[in-house]
Image (cartoon, rainbow, N blue to C red):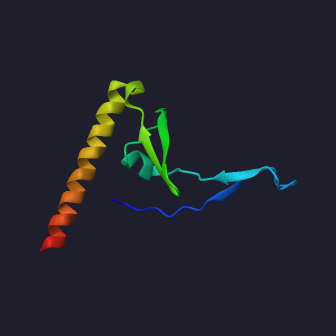
C-alpha cells in the first residue's frame, strides 16, 4: 500500500474570507495504478473525523475498465504479497 501526503487547500471566496471551504486535489498516474480510470464515477464516504473512503462505482464501468481495474488490483496484490514475503526473510 502506498501512502500519499497531500495538502488541504482553501477553496471559495478569498476576498470576503467568509465562504471558504476545504479542497483536496487528487491527480496523477498513481490513481490509475490504484484502479481509478478516467471517466469512472467514484463514491466518497465520510468514515470518521479526518477520514474518507473513495471507491470506484463498479456498475458504470465498461468491460474494458473492469478488466483494467482487475489487472491493476492483481498487480497491487502481487506487489503487497512480495513485499510482505521479503520483509519476513
Front residue (pair 50, 63): 50
Q: What residue is drawn where x is 29% and y is 33%?
A: 67
Establish if 89 lies above or below 19.
below
Residue 7 in percent (x, y) is at 59, 62
Residue 13 in percent (x, y) is at 81, 50
Residue 87 in percent (x, y) is at 19, 72
Front residue (pair 46, 44): 46
Front residue (pair 84, 48): 48
Q: What residue is drawn where x is 19% and y is 58%?
A: 81
**Viewport quadrant of the N terminus:** bottom left
- Side of 70 where 21 appears, left or right: right
Q: Quadrant of residue 88?
A: bottom left
Q: What residue is drawn where x is 62% and y is 59%?
A: 8
Establish if 64 lies above or below 80.
above
Residue 61 in percent (x, y) is at 39, 27
Question: What residue occupies the far bottom of the structure in this picture?
Answer: 89
Amino acid at each position: 500500500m502506498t501512502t500519499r501526503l497531500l495538502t488541504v487547500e482553501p477553496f471559495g471566496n478569498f476576498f470576503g474570507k467568509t465562504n471558504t471551504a476545504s479542497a483536496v486535489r487528487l491527480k496523477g498516474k498513481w490513481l490509475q495504478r490504484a484502479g481509478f480510470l478516467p471517466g469512472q464515477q467514484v463514491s466518497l464516504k465520510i468514515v470518521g473525523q479526518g477520514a474518507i473512503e473513495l471507491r470506484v462505482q463498479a456498475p458504470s464501468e465498461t468491460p474494458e475498465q473492469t478488466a483494467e481495474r482487475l489487472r491493476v488490483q492483481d498487480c497491487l496484490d502481487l506487489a503487497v504479497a512480495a513485499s510482505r514475503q521479503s520483509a519476513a526473510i
